Amino acid sequence: MSDGITIALDAMGGDQAPGMVVKGVEIALQRHPEVRFLLFGAEDEVQPLLAKLPNLGKSVTLYHTNEIVADDAKPSLALRTGRQSSMRLAIEAVADGRADGVVSAGNTGALMAIAKFVLKMLPGIDRPAIASFFPTRRGESVMLDLGANVECDAENLVQFALMGDVFARTVLGLIEPTVGLLNVGSEDLKGNDAVRGASARLRAMVTPIRFYGFIEGGDIAAGTVDVVVTDGFTGNVAVKTAEGTAKLFGEYLEAAFRHSLPARIGYLFARAALRKLRMRSDPRRYNGAIFLGLGGIAVKSHGSTDAFGFANAIGVAIDMKLNGVLDKIRVELARLSEAPSAPEPAL
């Protein structure tokens, strides 16, 4: 049960905010009627939307601010000057204990910078990682990092593997998730020093992690492992390529069914299956990337998502709190600090 949980929301973040945010809250409340929300944004824009949805009245508290972090704002500038922005105030609500998590569809870089400054890092974690769900042939996997760290060393990748393992066990409900390092090949000698060093340490450490080894790009969608670990540059490119490919496939399929009269007739018989396919591959279902490694729960929604997608991002924050992910990561980090060091990989 999610009794007593409060989620802070950046009401002004996202392409369709604040309307998308308010409608997302309405959908989220249907799934979690006992959750409470703190909305931070311009009262003259948000209040009229709330007035149209009186069922939200007892569940939502609005805090007024006219300051907004622009989508193109540099993270360093947003950190220095946006102290009264809707994003900053929502994050501070988590830091001071008024909220259990924060969700924003705003500027990713700014959200990361402000959240890292305000919420701090968990002990034993050097850098936060952006993690998210990924649909596979076997169900769902978690992939990290998706853009927070362009360059990573072996220690960063080991920490990502640990956090991804805890996340898969607590949120995905997997008893013994497998963890793989994304590489240019599966052979031990392939890859750069970072991935080879991380592999050596993960094989030598005494942890509950079931380390599979190296995986390649094709293994992501195949579901070869439950947790895919990579640096932020590679992860971001991989995810956006997959999203673009899925969209292209959908457009090709739609064009094929419009091509001729027999194709249109065939569509009538295939509608149910196509509806199932569309739902399975709908990116809104996987909306909500988690900033793992922070001292508080912070979830990033796609800026272009709609209310349904934003509600799913809210659901991710609620699941993080319900499953005690932060506390479990702290426990595993304590174990990690006691694990034996691995020998340096041969160059």
Image (cartoon, grey):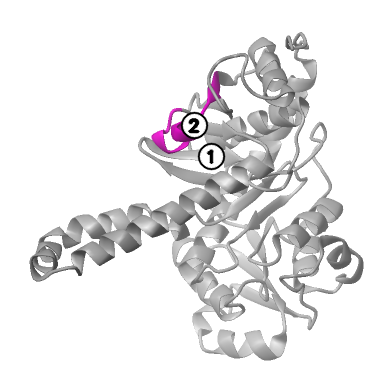
- Left or right: residue 286 versus residue 342 is left
Residue at point 67% right, 12% down?
206
Residue 73, percent across and down? Answer: 79, 69
The reply to whether the C-beta atoms of the residues labelled 1 and 2 are less than 8 Å apart is yes
Residue 101, percent across and down? Answer: 68, 56
Residue at point 87% right, 70% down?
83
User: Residue 301's quadrant in the figure?
Assistant: bottom right
Q: Name the residue under label 2.
A: 226
Q: Which of 234 and 134 is in front in this view?
A: 234
Q: Distance between the residues labelled 1 and 2?
A: 6 Å
Q: What stretch is highlighted in magenta?
A: 212-224
Q: Any magenta on residue 113?
A: no
Q: Which of 287 and 258 is in front in this view?
A: 258
Residue 131 visible, this orientation: no
Q: Name the residue under label 1.
A: 142
Residue at point 64% right, 13% down?
203
Residue 171, percent across and down? Answer: 53, 41
